[in-house]
């Protein structure tokens, strides 16, 4: 897991760290009430949640791994095995201020937070919803960027298309709006991607209607579109 910690402040003084994937640094969170996250992970309530989550994720642990012999009985070996496995509990070396500590899977955030306190759990719910919204927006932006330039897939080879998409991303990251990006990319790659793709598709359909096979159409289209785009296309 790449840890990119983002600190949020609970009640003005408590620094609690999450990452962009929704994992929580349980070590920093437990300081809210001066608790140790190991007590929750290896305790009765934590084991119940961990067992349910592992089943939902299809993670198979040895039989009896989550055995709970009593509400006050802890399983000291549980944390070590979970950390070695890395899928729902992870450990990062270093100070919590720099991302070190015990990290818990996003599905464990609210159950763990309720163990800390009711108001902390409500606060965590707000944070996790915000992180989800940010992740969805980032995914949508990435999807829009891909759709914006997929029209060039019909007229660029794989290497050129990769270069085109990288250039588009760099321009977007630098703050260029859609119109500016289209203008710069047109100069570099030879035309408005959506218009070029439409022209290509129309020409291909016309040639196909004339009875030309795929290899003949590709040869003619490659020559035609290379000429249209100043030799930028192959």
Image (cartoon, grey):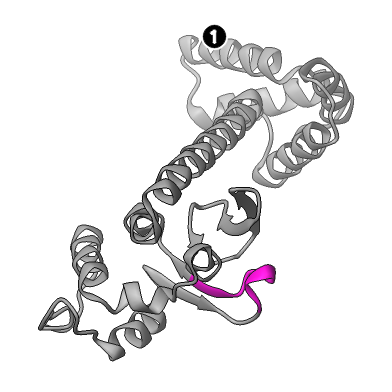
Identify residue for label 1: 206
Magenta extent: 95-102
Could you tell whether 227 is left or right of 73 in the image? right
SS state under label 1: helix
Quadrant of the snapshot with the C terminus: top right
Tell me residue 77's x, y (percent).
29, 90
Could you tell whether 170 is left or right of 119 in the image? right
Tell me residue 18's x, y (percent).
56, 56
Image-quadrant location for residue 97: bottom right
Residue 217 in the magenta stretch? The answer is no
Residue at x 59%, y 36% (from the top left corner): 138
- Say how many tags the image has: 1
Label 1 crowd bin: few (<14), some (14–19), many (20+), radius 10 Å: few
Tell me residue 228's x, y (percent).
81, 18
Residue at x 24%, y 61% (from the top left corner): 53
Residue at x 26%, y 76% (from the top left corner): 43
**Residue 79 position (above or below residue 144):** below
Foreground of the two, 173 or 94? 94
């Amino acid at each position: 897991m790449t840890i990119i910690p983002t600190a949020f402040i609970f009640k003005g003084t408590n620094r609690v760290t999450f990452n962009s994937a929704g994992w929580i640094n349980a070590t920093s969170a437990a300081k809210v009430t001066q608790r140790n996250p190991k007590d929750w992970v290896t305790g009765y309530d934590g084991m119940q949640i961990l067992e349910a989550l592992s089943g939902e994720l299809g993670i198979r642990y040895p039989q009896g791994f989550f055995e709970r012999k009593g509400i006050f009985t802890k399983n000291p070996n549980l944390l070590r095995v979970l950390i070695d496995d890395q899928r729902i509990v992870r450990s990062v070396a270093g100070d919590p201020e720099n991302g070190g500590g015990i990290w818990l899977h996003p599905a464990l955030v609210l159950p763990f937070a309720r163990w800390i306190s009711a108001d902390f759990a409500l606060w965590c719910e707000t944070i996790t919803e915000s992180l989800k919204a940010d992740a969805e927006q980032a995914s949508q932006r990435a999807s829009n960027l891909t759709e914006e330039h997929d029209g060039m897939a019909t007229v660029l080879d794989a290497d050129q298309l990769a270069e085109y998409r990288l250039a588009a991303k760099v321009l977007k990251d630098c703050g260029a709006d859609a119109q500016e990006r289209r203008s710069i990319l047109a100069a570099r790659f030879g035309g408005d991607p959506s218009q070029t793709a439409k022209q290509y598709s129309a020409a291909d359909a016309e040639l196909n209607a004339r009875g030309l096979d795929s290899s003949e159409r590709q040869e003619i289209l490659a020559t035609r579109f290379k000429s249209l785009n100043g030799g930028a296309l192959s």
